[in-house]
Every structure is written in structure tokens, then in C-alpha cells.
Amino acid sequence: MEARIAVLGGDGIGPEVTAESVKVIEAVGRRFGHTFEWVPGIVGGRSIDQTGKAITADTMNLLLGADAVLFGAVGGPKWDDPRAKVRPEDGILAMRKTLGLFANLRPVKVFSQLADSSPLREERIKGVDFVIIRELTGGLYFGKPKRRWENTRGRRAVDTLSYTEKEIQRVVRVGFELARMRRKRLHSLDKMNVMETSRLWREVATEVGHEYPDVELVHMLADNAAMQIVTNPAVFDVIVTENTFGDILSDEAAVIGGSMGMLPSASLTSIPKSGGRRRRGGKPSLYEPIHGSAPDIAGRGIANPLASILSSAMMLRWSFGLHKEAAAVEDAVEGFLAEGYRTADIATPGKPSLQTAKVGDMIAAHVLG
Ligand code: IPM
Ligand code: MN
């Protein structure tokens, strides 16, 4: 097959880690006979510096013409003034909204080779393998009004949490479809003891559940889930939740595997059936590591590219339906870790760690066999 992939490295370590994914996907193309065309674009702080905007209409059009988007990360101290009119993060938020990326899949897998790097005891993290589905185009991130003002009594700001039943239905459906492909358990997280949107969320999730009698639906309060993620993470198979809850809980879940540098994500525009190609004329899905731009280590060539590389495996699976190709990349990552290779974030103290580019070379070589 042939596919056109937009590459937006962004800021900080973003461009460094996405470059390694490009290497690995190119190796997949060579081994399995596919052709990938790469279309570069700019977003985030670099785009602000060059154009005054976190993402331009031209770049957005470039994404709309691609089959998938490989994204790195945005942000950095240079653009962090809270009073700034435009922020690098506006770029990723605009992509999510414009492309309609409503379902963000964040798989949390503990590689047994990295059990030592986890802050949790080994027996707790054994067999941990779940996916957080974070609603990505609604909730507290996008609700209106969203603004601040000042009057004689002082300053005030407001964000709004709002959901329609349709928004809840479609993301919960992704949860059920994914659970059906896995261990058939779906945890739906909310704060129904406090919030009206959560009560609607729980009601709609229960209704959608009637279409999936083979999947066990468990409702859980989000704060309780935060505790379960560190005390009993192996109970989870698939989790579905509101945008902000998903943001917070996925960072928490990410570290139990040992490093944020290992966790990939996929932001999808449609309900995956078993991962076929996207519909003709449909919008592209986007793939990115869950870590940020890590400005403190940017440019030093020491970032861990595995989260980005694993995100590109998700791209092969969910955008192109290339299941054995995706598995080949994931196997290469497992093999790399099993052979004892490490980057700085997961290194055993006192042992040498590999440079970013070397990791990409080795994974690509592994894919080529
Ligand atoms: C994430 C990030 C983003 C978010 C930021 C960079 C806007 O933290 O993808 O989890 O809050 O969604
Ligand atoms: Mn986050």
C-alpha cells in the first residue's frame, strides 16, 4: 500500500523522537513492500516564532490532505508566560478539534524488563495491560464560556464542563468496541456524586452498554480510580472517561510502567472496528507519545524515542490496518529491551545508555530482520 503521512515534530524533543519513528516506518515499508510519503509541517512554539500562530490554516490543510499525522510534542519555557495571547498548546488543541479526534487511546503496558524502574512493587504491576480512552474534543478543555475578566471585586475566570449525549455515546462506543477486542471489561469513570455532566455520562454509558451484553461495564468514581491505578492496576482492561480526568489519570498511569518515555497514544476520528483503513475523504487520525517536549533535555540526543516509535506502530494498526507490520515494530521494541538496551530515562544507574538516534537505528534494523 501507499500512504501519505504528515510529520509535525513540534518543539523540544518532539522532532528528535519523531525522526526515529520515520526511520522505523521506512524500515517497515522496505520489509513489507509499502511506500510512505512524508509531508513535514510546523506547529507549536516554532510556528508561533515563524508565523505568530500555533498552527496556520496552510498547515491544517496539509494535515487534512494526509492519511495520518505523526506528531511529537509542543511547548517550552520560551512560550510559557501565562499572559501570552497565543500558546504552543493551542496548536495541538486546534488539531484535535479540527480533525475531530474525539477518542484518545493511551495504552498502559508494563514491560516486564522494566519492572525495576517502576515506583510500584513488582507484584502490583505484574500483568498490567490496560488502555485509557480519553474523550478529546469536549469536556472541560473546550466548553464555553472559557474566559477571564476583572471587575471592582477582583479577577475571575471560568471554564465550562459540558457534554451532549452524542459526544458521550461515540466515545463510550469506542470503549466497548475496544473491550470486545480485548478482555471484555470496560470501566467508565465519572464524578456522578458531584457533577451533572457525570450523571449524564453514567446514564448514557449504561444505555450504550445494552448493545454490548458481552462486555462487563463497571462504573467507578474518577478519584477512586486514581487510587486503584496505583493499588490494583491489573483490574483494568479498558477505561473510558472525560477529557480532563483522562489527561490526569493517564500521566499517573504512565509512570507505573517505569517511564513516561514508553507510552504511545492514538487520537482517532472514528470508532475502530478491527482497525481498517480510514474511509475515503475522512479525516486523518493522529499519533503521538504521551510525554511532552521535555525542554530540559532537548537537543542533547538522549530522549527516549520508544513512545513515539510505539505510536507509529499504533498508526500502522489503526489508520492503515497493517496488523503484522504493527506487531513487527512492537516485537522489535520488546526485543530491544529484552537484550538489555536502555535510554537514560530507564537506565540502570551506573550502566551506559543509548543515544536517541542509535535506538531508532537498532529498532529499524530489528524490523528489517
Ligand atoms: C496531553 C498534554 C496536552 C493536554 C497539553 C500539551 C495541551 O498534556 O496530551 O496529555 O493537556 O491534553
Ligand atoms: Mn497530559
Image: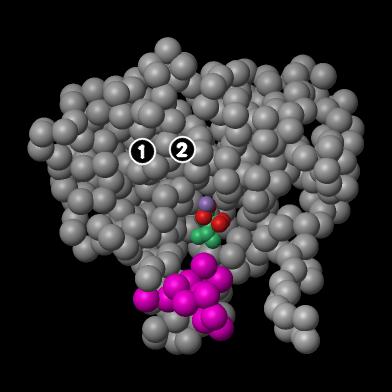
Q: Residue at x 39, y 42 (%)?
A: 260
Along the line of sight, which residue is nearer the eye, 158 or 355? 158
Magenta segment range? 78-91
* Secondary structure category for the residue under label 1: loop
Above/below status of 328 relative to 71: above
Q: Is residue 172 above or below residue 281?
A: above
Q: Does 358 sit left or right of 127 as displayed?
A: left
Main secondary structure type of the part rendered in magenta: loop
Q: Which residue is mark 2?
A: 254
Amino acid bearing label 2: Ala
Cα–Cα gap, marks 2 and 1: 7 Å
Coloring scheme used: one colour
- Return the residue at label 1: 259
Q: Quadrant of residue 10?
A: bottom left
Counting other residues with Cα less than 10 Å from the Cα at mark 1, is it few (<14), some (14-19), or many (20 or more)? Answer: many
Picture coordinates of residue 330, whole percent (x, y):
36, 32
- Whether label 1 lies within 8 Å of ligand 2 gets the answer no
Residue 284's place in the image compared with 171, above or below, is below
